[in-house]
Image: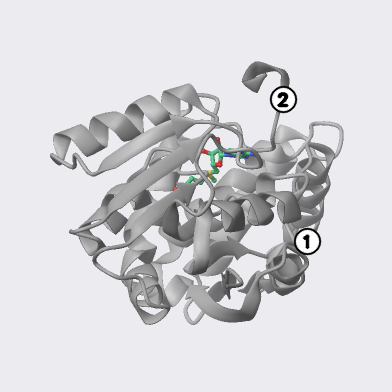
Amino acid sequence: MLEDQVHSYDHGGDPVELGRLSLQADVAWAMERAQLLSVGLKPTDRVLDVGCGPGHLSCRIAELVPEGSVTGVDTDPNLLASARRSAAKLGLDRVSFERSWADGMPLDTASADFAYARFLLQHVGQPVDVIREMGRVIRPGGTVMVVDTDDGGILVHPEPSGLKELLEASQAGQAAQGGDRLIGRKLAHHMTAAGLEDVQVQVVPFTSSLVGTEAWIQICLGFKTRVVEDDALSVDRVRSTLDAVRRALQQPGAFAQTLVYVATGTVPR
Ligand SMILES: C[S@@+](CC[C@H](N)C(=O)[O-])C[C@H]1O[C@@H](n2cnc3c(N)ncnc32)[C@H](O)[C@@H]1O
């Protein structure tokens, strides 16, 4: 039953979190578009976007497959409704959405060419099961691509006080809900364990120089503040740490980075 299960992503209907997803989709699209094309996405491909959320990427990918289709899958009915509205507004009738858990999708075996999951696996208790299920739906020789991050890649200079504690508390909070904030480094292992071949991982820096200070803070630290549990770090401590990050990054020459991991693998023939 969909309603009986939980995962570590809860937007809580908060417009700030929904705005964060939209900003994240906007600023990274040029890089992700290039990655999708470089790993061989074709205009005719039938694409599966697993954990599609509000469908920002499903709709953009549809532009890259003018003779194909996109199926978005997610558990969240509100995000799916928003995704359907966006696709309808853009007149994208080759994009459809299904409500389902990622580890058991109501889709036929070998019925698509390219599976994609962006910032999904960090929320999933059994990521190998999800990747294996993606591989089941993709035809032999097709591609599975997952994009995720890893808190080990977060650096801010000069280092603001409290940042280390915030990262540790959000890692613990997300782990308690079945997620993993250190998943980037494990993607090659998970893809291989799921039976994919030719597994490759690229790491792309995402910096404050590239997107600006405020966007970096919102995208890279915004969700973390939601998963911190009160008994680990108080709301006031979280707020003062974000202020400290902001002050640090306002100094001339300040710099912040995180790393985005892009892992691809091929379904065995
Ligand atoms: C951080 S959002 C990313 C949304 C979208 N991929 C993007 O990049 O904008 C994670 C999404 O994964 C969905 N999700 C988390 N665990 C899931 C699971 N086990 N099965 C299906 N969807 C899941 C959530 O509902 C949420 O929409």
Q: Nearer the viewer, residue 38 or 138?
A: 138
CA neighbours of label 1 inside 10 A, class few (<14), some (14 to 19), many (20+): few
Image coordinates of residue 243 in percent, x first then y, are 59, 51
Q: Is mark 2 within 8 Å of ligand 1?
A: yes
At label 1, the amino acid type is Lys
Which residue carries the number 1 mark?
164
Q: Are marks 1 and 2 in contact (CB under 8 Å)?
A: no
Q: Position of residue 266 (x, y in %)?
A: 56, 73
Whole-angstrom CA distance, mark 1 to mark 2, is 31 Å
In this picture, is 172 found above or below 199?
Answer: above
Which quarter of the image is occupied by the N terminus? top right
Residue 83 image offset from top left, x and y in percent: 34, 35
Q: Quadrant of ligand 1?
A: top right
Residue 81 visible in the current orientation? yes
**Which residue is at 77% across, 48% downward?**
126
Amino acid identity at mark 2: Gln
Residue 59 against residue 13 in the figure, above or below: below
Q: Residue 227, relative to residue 60: is it above or below?
A: above
Q: Which residue is mark 2?
A: 5
Q: Residue at x 67, y 45 (%)?
A: 123
Q: Quadrant of residue 68?
A: bottom left
Crowd around label 2: few <14 · some 14–19 · many ≥20 (10 Å): few
Residue 152: percent from left, percent from top: 73, 70
- The secondary structure type at the circle numbered 2 is loop
